[in-house]
Image (tube, helix red, strand yellow):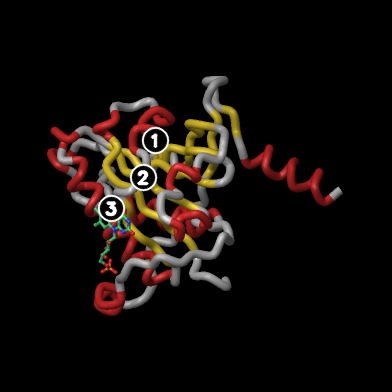
Amino acid sequence: MKQLFAVALFASALSFSANAQEVTYPLPAPAISGGRPLMDVISERHSSRAFSPRPIDDQTLSEVLYAAYGVSHDQGKRTIPMARGKNTMNVYVFRADGVWLYNPLRLNLSQVYPKDMRFIFATQDYAKDVPVHLVFTGPEEDYSAMEAGSAYQNVGLYATSRGLNNIVRGFFDKKKVAEILNIDDDEVIVSQAIGWPPQQ
Ligand SMILES: Cc1cc2nc3c(=O)[nH]c(=O)nc-3n(C[C@H](O)[C@H](O)[C@H](O)COP(=O)(O)O)c2cc1C
């Protein structure tokens, strides 16, 4: 019975848009005020190489993604500066239920791949248990790599404030990731592992 309820809950959380191919996953509105004092989190930011497998709840994930690339102003501005105001960078989420693209304007995720592909990031032992890997992508000519740097720094600061562990990672199979995302190899910039500290 419990299992049936969980399946029904999951099915209702996924919605099928007008385009029958598109599976979307709604995100709760991020809390856009509060958190720990800025200078404290700047001073405490650090990389971690130990993670609990405990999943990241939707509210926390929505706030991670808002920090990375959310829409923060009425005029459509993002939480990071964008070169020439173009929004060509993308943020993907690799988690147990598949691979998803973050849509900041729609405040949802759209499914890119229906299977758990996190093993791609297990190129270092500590990365095996990570619940969420973000991947930042975009064309080099649009300065996407610099935008990814702004995004992962924001996520690192949010993680410090929220008590999450995180680490930016360049060591993973970018070719395989590009295949899954159906983009050019050189558009895969960098990844970031996010999770709770061990024993949580
Ligand atoms: C672009 C970039 C790529 C990185 N790639 C990896 C990686 O593949 N594996 C890893 O363990 N750490 C990686 N790191 C994390 C750095 O090793 C880490 O930031 C550095 O040791 C400084 O530690 P701190 O972040 O705690 O100050 C990367 C960091 C950056 C900025």
For the C terminus, which image quadrant? bottom right
> Disc 3 or 2, which lies upstream in sequence?
3
Label 2 lies in ligand 1 vicinity (Cβ under 8 Å): yes
Circle 3 or circle 2, nearest the eye: 2
Q: Is residue 126 above or below residue 113?
A: below
Q: Position of residue 12 (x, y in %)?
A: 67, 39
Amino acid identity at mark 2: Phe
> Disc 2 or 1, which lies upstream in sequence?
2
* Mark 1–mark 3 distance (CA, rounded to whole Å): 19 Å
Circle 1 or circle 3, nearest the eye: 1
Label 3 lies in ligand 1 vicinity (Cβ under 8 Å): no
Closest to the observer, 117 or 29: 117
Kindly indicate whether the residue at mark 1 contacts the one at mark 2 (C-beta within 8 angstroms): yes
* Residue 144 left/right relative to 49: left
Which mark, by number, is residue 177? Answer: 1
Look at mark 3 in the image and give the residue it sits on.
151
Please rate how many residues cluster around mark 1, counting C-alpha atoms within 10 Å: few if below 14, some from 14 to 19, many from 20.
Answer: some
Amino acid identity at mark 1: Val
Look at mark 2 in the image and give the residue it sits on.
172
**Ligand 1 is found in which quarter of the picture?**
bottom left
Task: Tell me which corner region of the image, top left, top right, bottom left or bottom right, holds residue 182.
Answer: top left
On the question of residue 30 being in view, the answer is no
Q: Is residue 105 above or below residue 167?
A: above
